[in-house]
Image (cartoon, grey):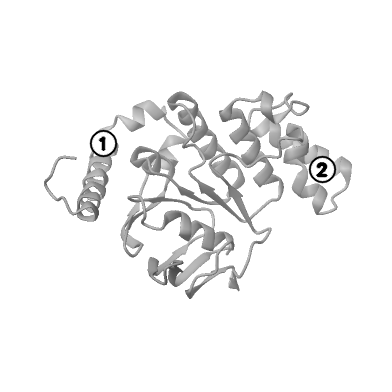
Amino acid sequence: MQNLVAEKIGMIYKLPDGSQVEALKDVSFTLEEGRILTLLGPSGCGKTTLLNILAGFLAPTSGVVSLSDRKIDGPGQDRGMVFQQGALFEWLSVEENVGFGPRMNGRPAAETKKVVDDLLDIVGLGGFGSKAVYELSGGMQQRVALARCLANDPDVILMDEPLGALDALTREKMQGLILKLWKETGKTIILVTHSVEEALFLGDRLFVMAPRPGRIEREYELPFAAQGLEVNPRELKTSKEFIEKREEILSLIWEMEEEIMGSRGEVL
């Protein structure tokens, strides 16, 4: 099993003035292969720091992260990252962006073309391969970013606010695409978001993180991601069960925000 395991992860940032900020403390979990985990919490709770540690972009100051019993000590092809703004190569076409990883890995041109064409069809961009990135909308660019990540066939896909810059309608369509890719590929996915509704809808497992220092405050096992593959998203998001869970988590995060601001009970 390609399980992702975090054991007592801690991260301390040293500031130029000699002071320190403890971004994460004793974060531990095991994420089984094929799960989709969403990370939620107030600003400053270490969501992105944790994601960067899992990606291998940052080395924790304490603790160990492993994937399939192999310690993560840097970036690797077994993990793929999708950023908020796509981070695409503007000077390359859509198909050149998606095929970048396979080309760098020395895969034959014909094989790479087939992979690229198949992935563009999967993300709904068939026929757009020759387009320049700047000709695409924000939602289409994020589809390219997803396809480029999948082209490397990672075991784990890490997403840092991948839908945060999109309008509401495009965002909801992209949520459906992420669930579709999760079902069809069987990949393990970890997604950071500030949207409670998005975290509930996309995560079959959800961590609410608390700040100062960042830690897992509460965990949820959720049915909505699996249900979202079968029923209308609007119907699901307006269901009694979904709304009750959303309000529970909103209240939890609101209490954290008040504590952070030192203004419990004060209207901001």
What quarter of the picture does the C terminus occupy? top left
On screen, residue 78 versus residue 206, left or right, reads right
- Kindly identify the residue that appears in the image at 57 percent across and 59 percent down: 55
- Kindly identify the residue that appears in the image at 77 percent across and 45 percent down: 100
Tell me residue 65's x, y (percent): 52, 69
Tell me residue 24's x, y (percent): 40, 66
- Comparing 222 with 268, the one in front is 268
* Mark 2 vs mark 1, CA separation in Å: 44 Å
Would you name the residue on which mark 2 appears? Answer: 112
What quarter of the picture does the N terminus occupy? bottom right
At label 2, which amino acid type do we have? Thr
Does 151 appear above or below 240? below
- Residue at the left extreme of this rendering: 265
Q: Which mark is residue 76?
A: none
Query: How many circles with numbers are drawn on the protein?
Result: 2
Q: Earlier in the sequence, mark 2 or mark 1?
A: 2
Q: Label 2's element?
A: helix
